[in-house]
Image (cartoon, rainbow, N blue to C red):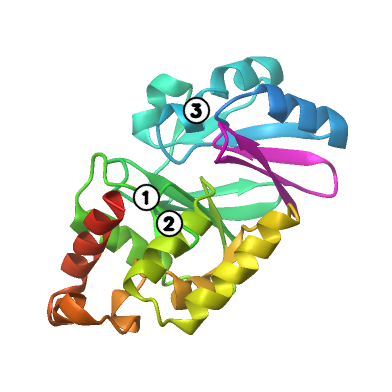
């Protein structure tokens, strides 16, 4: 199995997973032109589309791709009006490209958000980003925290395929509240070097996220000053506070 991505709308990721027979899956196509161009360039044949949620920047290319390739679309119930043909939810398993895909319910960013796991990749949509997480548009902080904790149960070498490229911005926020954190500082330098050389930053490994993502497990971090008192709170409340701080960063 091989993976590549396309950047759309400046910072969106459209993921393409394909096998040695050149059959591919398209995950969260926010537009269709670049997907078609890539398929022509790599001689790929799409067999299905997977959707994590209903936001336009993840679904705008669905109908065109569906019409062109005559393929099924798997997604949560909230994407029914976006072209989904097969509703999937937690516990469902899809056998595609001779691989078993597991569906996870991930409410928070939207109420019906889902994710897809096929070893070693997890397609997290707008739930978990490298060094960050998605905004709460429809779900609660408790729901989002629970969704992220669910992702954190996956094997440490899981590759997190997120829906956006916000890594540097997320690291700047994390360092604003944890200025002495060596892991964050070193990773920020690495990310800046990757950007400078136009190299990909994602997917990132879950074991790395456990070291640099304050939203994944806040108790792992040594907060100072006013934030230190947060460590006496329940973890979901710490998450909620950090997410609100990030909103205003």
Q: Residue at 60% of width from left, 70% of height from top?
A: 189
Q: Decide: few, some or many residues near mark 3? Use Cα within 10 Å; few <14, some 14-19, many ≥20.
A: many
Left or right: residue 143 versus residue 121 is left
Q: Mark 2 to mark 1: distance in Å?
A: 6 Å
121, above or below 69, in the image? below
Q: Decide: few, some or many residues near mark 2? Use Cα within 10 Å; few <14, some 14-19, many ≥20.
A: many
In the picture of the structure, the residue carrying the numbered disc 1 is 134
Q: Decide: few, some or many residues near mark 1? Use Cα within 10 Å; few <14, some 14-19, many ≥20.
A: many
Q: Which mark is residue 246?
A: none
Secondary structure beneath dot 1 equals loop
The spot of residue 59 in percent (x, y) is 50, 28
Q: Residue at 43% of width from left, 81% of height from top?
A: 181
In the picture of the structure, the residue carrying the numbered disc 3 is 59
**What is the span of residues highlighted in magenta in the rendered image?**
1-28
Q: Mark 2 to mark 3: distance in Å?
A: 18 Å
The spot of residue 120 in percent (x, y) is 62, 64
């Amino acid at each position: 199995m091989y993976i590549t991505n396309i950047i759309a709308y400046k910072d969106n990721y459209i993921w393409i997973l394909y096998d040695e027979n050149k059959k591919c899956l398209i995950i969260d196509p926010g537009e269709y032109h670049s997907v078609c161009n890539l398929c022509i360039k790599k001689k790929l044949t799409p067999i299905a589309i997977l959707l994590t949620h209903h936001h336009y920047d993840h679904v705008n290319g669905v109908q065109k791709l569906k019409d062109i390739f005559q393929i099924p679309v798997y997604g949560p119930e909230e994407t029914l009006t976006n072209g989904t043909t097969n509703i999937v939810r937690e516990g469902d398993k899809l056998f595609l490209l001779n691989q078993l895909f597991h569906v996870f319910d991930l409410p928070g960013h939207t109420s019906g958000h889902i994710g897809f796991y096929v070893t070693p990749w997890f397609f997290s949509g707008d739930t978990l980003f490298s060094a960050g997480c998605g905004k709460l548009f429809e779900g609660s902080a408790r729901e989002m925290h629970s969704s992220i904790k669910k992702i954190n149960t996956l094997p440490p070498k899981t590759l997190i395929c997120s829906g956006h490229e916000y890594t540097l911005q997320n690291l700047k926020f994390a360092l604003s509240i944890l200025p002495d954190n060596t892991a964050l500082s070193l990773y920020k330098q690495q990310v800046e070097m990757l950007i400078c050389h136009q190299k990909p930053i994602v997917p990132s490994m879950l074991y790395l996220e456990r070291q640099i993502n304050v939203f994944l497990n806040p108790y792992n971090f040594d907060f100072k000053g006013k934030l230190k008192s947060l460590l006496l709170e329940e973890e979901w409340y710490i998450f909620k506070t950090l997410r609100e701080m990030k909103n205003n960063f």
